[in-house]
Image (cartoon, rainbow, N blue to C red):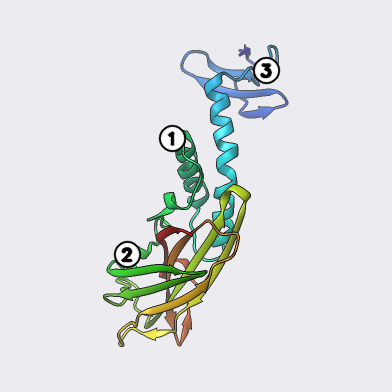
């Protein structure tokens, strides 16, 4: 890669045209021409494989990301989804939903911090998915005093990733005061005809005055179950 060292470039930073002004231990401050300016840039086999994995991983990651991005996420969710699917592809597996089990949609505001002891049972009868969520305690907001109620929701993602198809179904429980016991939440959901697999997510929302607060730091959402149709 071509490098230019000049008194003119020593006070410059950033990129100008095809030149990027950088500082290194070996050359000090200098201008670096972009790769391929003077000789054609050639991808080696490992770089080509990495590029192809990224392209292949982008499709399932985008489907999942779009399904939950308006519900609960942090700034790392997209890169974490890409990383999960790139690893799966590198290991020789076909992208699926099973690899998402245990995924927290936000690493900072997790479901596990709010509700760590629960049970989720799922079964299929004909074209119906039966889900039963049983909490063993109410969610806990340790440092937030204004939350006095909560709402639990079931999110089910039905997918055929090979054909880039995904459908989201949502079943919301009632707003329950924290002074009362959180009741089990049951759902019977019709499975779309295209579906090959499914993922179940639990979302807990902090509530006040009978409705969700709508703030990220009082919510949690996690993939708790996956299965095949």
Q: Is residue 6 left or right of residue 220?
A: right
| C-beta proximity under 8 Å, tags 2 and 3 | no
Instruction: Residue 30: name its quadrant.
Output: top right
Q: Where residue 228 sits: x, y (%)?
A: 46, 57
Nearer to us: label 1 or label 2: 1
**Which element carries disc 2, helix, strand or loop?**
helix
Mark found first going from the N terminus, 1 or 2: 1
Per the rendering, the mark at residue 52 is none
| Viewer-nearest residue: 172 or 216 | 172
- The residue sitting at the right extreme is 17
Determine the image quadrant of residue 39. top right
Q: Residues within 10 Å of mark 2 (few under 14, many from 20)?
A: some
Mark 1, secondary structure of its residue: loop
Residue 106: image location, x then y, percent: 44, 58
- What kind of element bears circle 3? loop
C-beta proximity under 8 Å, tags 1 and 2? no
Counting residues from the N terminus, which is met first, the one under dot 2 or under dot 3?
3
Spatial separation of the CA atoms under disc 1 and disc 2: 31 Å
- Which residue is disc 3 drawn over? 36
Give the residue pinned by disc 1.
91
Per the model, the C-alpha gap separating discs 1 and 3 is: 32 Å
Front position in the image: 31 or 92: 92
Question: Tag on residue 113?
Answer: 2
Q: Position of residue 14 (x, y in %)?
A: 62, 30
Which picture quadrant has residue 120?
bottom left
Residue at image point 45% right, 77% down:
187
The percent coordinates of residue 113 (x first, y second) are 32, 64
Q: Is residue 218 above or below residue 185?
A: above
Sequence-wise, which precedes: disc 1 or disc 3?
Answer: 3
Marks 2/3: CA distance?
Answer: 49 Å
């Amino acid at each position: 890669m071509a490098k230019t060292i000049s008194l003119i470039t020593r006070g410059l930073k950033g990129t100008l045209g095809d030149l990027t002004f950088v500082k290194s231990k070996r050359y000090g401050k200098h201008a670096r021409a972009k790769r391929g300016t003077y000789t054609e840039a050639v991808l080696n086999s490992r770089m080509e494989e990495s590029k192809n994995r990224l392209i292949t991983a982008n499709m399932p990651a985008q489907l999942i990301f779009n399904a939950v991005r308006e519900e609960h996420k942090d700034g790392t969710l997209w890169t974490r989804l890409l990383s999960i699917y790139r690893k799966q592809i590198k290991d020789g597996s076909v992208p699926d939903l099973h690899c998402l089990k245990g995924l927290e949609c936000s690493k900072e505001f997790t479901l596990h911090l709010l509700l760590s002891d629960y049970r989720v049972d799922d079964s299929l009868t004909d074209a119906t998915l039966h889900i039963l969520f049983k909490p063993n305690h109410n969610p806990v907001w340790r440092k937030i005093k204004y939350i006095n109620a909560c709402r639990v929701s079931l999110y089910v993602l039905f997918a055929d990733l090979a054909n880039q198809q995904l459908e989201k179904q949502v079943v919301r429980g009632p707003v329950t005061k924290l002074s009362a016991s959180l009741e089990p939440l049951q759902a019977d959901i019709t499975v779309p005809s295209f579906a090959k697999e499914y993922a179940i997510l639990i979302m807990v929302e902090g509530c006040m005055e009978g409705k969700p607060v709508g703030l990220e730091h009082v919510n949690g959402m996690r993939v708790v179950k996956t299965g095949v149709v």
